[in-house]
Amino acid sequence: MTNTPQPPPSHDLVGIGFGPSNVALAIGLREQRERAAADPAAPPLSGVFLERQAEFGWHRGMLLDDATMQVSFLKDLVTTRNPASDFGFLSYLHAAGRLHDFINHKTLFPLRTEFHDYLAWCADRVGDQVRYGAEAVGVEPVRDEGGRIAQLDVVARTADGAYHRSRGRNVVFAPGLTPRLPAGARLSGRVWHNEYLLQRLEGLDAAPAPRSFVVVGAGQSAAECVEHLYRRFPEAQVHTVFTRYGYSPSDDSPFANRIFDPEAVDDFYGASTETKAEIMGYHRNTNYSVVDPDLIDTLYQAAYQDKVKGTERLRMHNTSRVADVREGPGGVTVTVEDLAGGKHTAVEADYLVYATGYSAADPRGLLGELAEHVVGDSEGRPAVERDYRLATSDEVTCGIYLQGGTEHTHGISSSLLSNVAVRVGEILDAISARTGAAVRPEEAAAFGR
């Protein structure tokens, strides 16, 4: 007699990825269970998270020594949803013994390295819910007796090549962002994306030191790379290439910052396609291809001092683009085209860094046959409900939720930390309602609804 394999245990949710968004979701899940423990009428939600990395890490390649966050510490993983939570940034500072020191610092914007430490502190405290070293490679349907897709099996591959399944009545995708490159660009030992800048720079401080870098891009990450390389390698030239005339300052003014408020998500979601496009156009300068004004001043001062000294280590190739890249044994030759005059200049460099942004991962790549059940919009993008659930055919009764990749439906805060605390509350509310463990009105208020 052949033994029938036992199905894996079912969870209320399976989270794919364990970056800041799903760490925040794990915190919310833990807090929901704590409330449910005191109320038998509110069944606790169960969940498990899958993360391909061996430990928590968030943009480690850009944890530059003096880089600060562009978002207030109050927009951490919990505070705007539940200010009383002990998972807030201030609770982290208290545990680290730096609360008074931070208060005396009089800033809303901590060092990026410090905020990463806060995120890791949170991830460690909910580490019992995550399986590290488990990369999700596919999602398979589990049908009920009526033939409907009622659950999903997330298939993950571990570091030793083994496969295992995690079954959930809901799946929450938070795969993060993938580095974006210009068409035709290829990464190599000398051509990098800034996502891995610090890892690539390890060992380069020893002699012989690099003589020249080229950095492509006009946004915050590009400017940070330029400043870091210029300061770290005092004998090297740093060429920066971008299509703009100069770095554009980010709009961090109070009224413009309302675009990141939870209420703005409602406004954006209910707007017409034309209005959505207008809103994105008006407020792109809050986040895209813009630079902190203080950093712009720092770079301009460096360029001016170079001219005074006659060294010109920092060389700006504005209104320009990379027309060709040829790699040789001793470096790369980057052909820079001046878009205004058409002139081509060959720049010899040891390394080329593309700081050209990121793209949101499309969850449909993991869904396999399930992808045909996802409703698309007029431009082929996945349609997403207000509660971040993918719109699907009636055959699918389980929930597939997105944390990221919803900019076209929910607005500019989709991939940012600004709204993560409130967003996970909304997702947990939706999952609770779908599983019969509805959140009581007073709890909904704590979720920031």
Image (cartoon, rainbow, N blue to C red):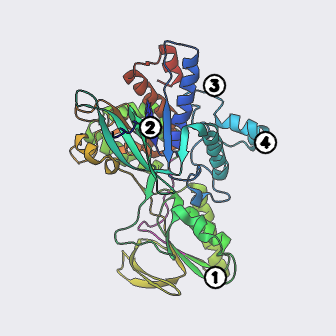
Q: In terms of secondary structure, where does tag 4 sit? A: helix
Whether residue 210 appears in this view of the structure is: yes
Residue type marked 1: Thr
Q: Earlier in the sequence, mark 3 or mark 4?
A: 3
Circle 1 sits on which residue?
311
Q: Position of residue 82 (x, y in %)?
A: 57, 26
Q: Is residue 388 left or right of residue 300?
A: left
Instruction: Give the residue type at disc 4.
Output: Asp
Label 3 vs label 2, nearer the camera: 2
User: Of helix, strand and loop, which mostly describes the magenta segment?
Assistant: loop
Report x, y in % for residue 378.
Answer: 20, 44
Question: Is 370 above or below relative to 11?
Answer: below
Q: Is residue 373 left or right of residue 386?
A: left
If you read the primary sequence from the N terminus, does the residue marked by circle 4 or circle 1 appear first?
4
For the residue labelled by badge 3, is the local secondary structure a helix, a strand or a loop?
loop
- Residue hosting label 2: 14
Instruction: Report the span colored magenta.
Output: 239-251
- 73 shown above or below 207: above
Residue 105 image-quadrant placement: top right
Taking the spot 41% from the left edge, 71% from the top edge, the residue there is 319
Disc 2: CA contacts within 10 A as few (<14), some (14-19) or many (>=20): many
Residue under label 3: 84
Percent of width and height locating residue 197: 56, 66
- Where 45 falls versus 245 (above or below)? above
Q: Residues within 10 Å of mark 4 (few under 14, many from 20)?
A: few
Between marks 1 and 2, how big is the CA–CA gap?
56 Å
